[in-house]
Amino acid sequence: MSPVQSFVTRRPVVTYFALAFGISWAGGLFVLGPSRIPTTVELLMTIGPIIYVAMLAGPSVAGLQMTSLVSGRAGLRELLARLTTWRVGRRWYAVALLAPPLMVISVSLALSFFSPDFLPAIFITNEKPALLSGVVAGLIVGIFEELGWTGFAIPRVRRRYGVFSTGLLVGVLWGAWHFPMFWEPESFSGALPFGVLLVRLFSWLPAFRILMVWVYDRTGSLLVAMLMHGSLTAAQLIFMPPPSSSGMTLMISILAWAAALWIVVALIAVGDRWQLSRPLHQQMA
């Protein structure tokens, strides 16, 4: 066995994240080009679909490749079995599909009592985001990202850590992985733009990933994880504040969304009698 094969066998999760980041970031930088960084509006309106395709190749290709290398055909069959696990109970589909849009809308409407700037674009502009395109984009993102995050990484991290620690670890890395999509020309020009970048990457993504790990832990369904991720992406594309939102308005919006998610995590932890902190082997003992 070569040193590379030995490392991959001993450190499959580390290798997976290295591959996912390497493929995604290299693809994203190739699309963006070495000399310019688009604004958020430009990213959404012009090269957004292209960079998303490049980025999505990372977790999906890395997940399938590492599953094949570590577990062979048996691992791929097991991955397919989790992908086709759909008999999990209606309540879990309700949580996966309805919770993200309801929370996005609730936070935006709550903030709108203080300022109309927080209202989603769909409520205040004549140019309505296409519902169908938002749903399709959400499904694509959910399927391709979760082939790696939930398909490969999370089950292996979960063997050693509880739901909370697993979601926090993967969530922080998941946030860092989004860096090419949230980075703007002014991100490092001052405290406020840099703060907006940090809260975009790390304030709410770990919390939502904890919720996703919790749902996956209860269902064992990769399909449900994909739907939950897709629902989140679709909800944000359809009900997000206007793309022109920036500065303090954007900061407050993201922090409020993050606070809502962390409150839900805390409520689930209390309701589960803090079982979120127990590793998988302890729960099975």
Image: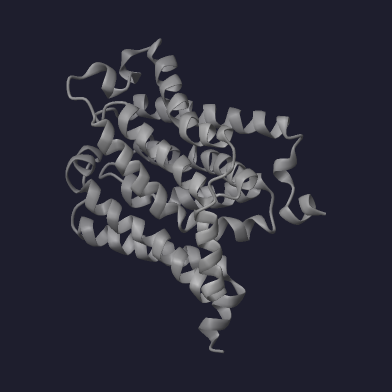
In the image, residue 165 lies at what x, y percent? 65, 48
Q: How many marks?
A: 0
Q: Nearer the viewer, residue 59 or 71?
A: 71
Q: Is residue 56 left or right of residue 66?
A: left
On screen, residue 60 above or below 110: below
Q: Quadrant of the N terminus?
A: bottom right
On screen, residue 206 above or below 280: above
Q: Is residue 60 left or right of residue 163?
A: left
On screen, residue 60 above or below 91: below
Task: Residue at 24%, 29% (x, y): give it.
Answer: 129
Colouring chosen for the image of the structure: one colour
Q: Nearer the viewer, residue 32 or 231?
A: 231
On screen, residue 233 above or below 83: above
Task: Residue at 72%, 30% (x, y): give it.
Answer: 270
Q: Is residue 157 left or right of residue 121?
A: right
In the image, residue 91 lies at what x, y percent? 58, 32
In the image, residue 12 lies at what x, y percent? 56, 70
Q: Nearer the viewer, residue 216 or 11?
A: 216
Determine if residue 205 is in view: yes
Q: Is residue 279 left or right of residue 201?
A: right
Determine if residue 177 is in view: no
In the picture as drawn, the residue positioned furthest to the bottom comes out as 1
Task: Residue at 22%, 58% (x, y): give it.
Answer: 31
Task: Residue at 57%, 39% (x, y): give it.
Answer: 211
In the image, residue 240 lies at what x, y percent? 33, 29
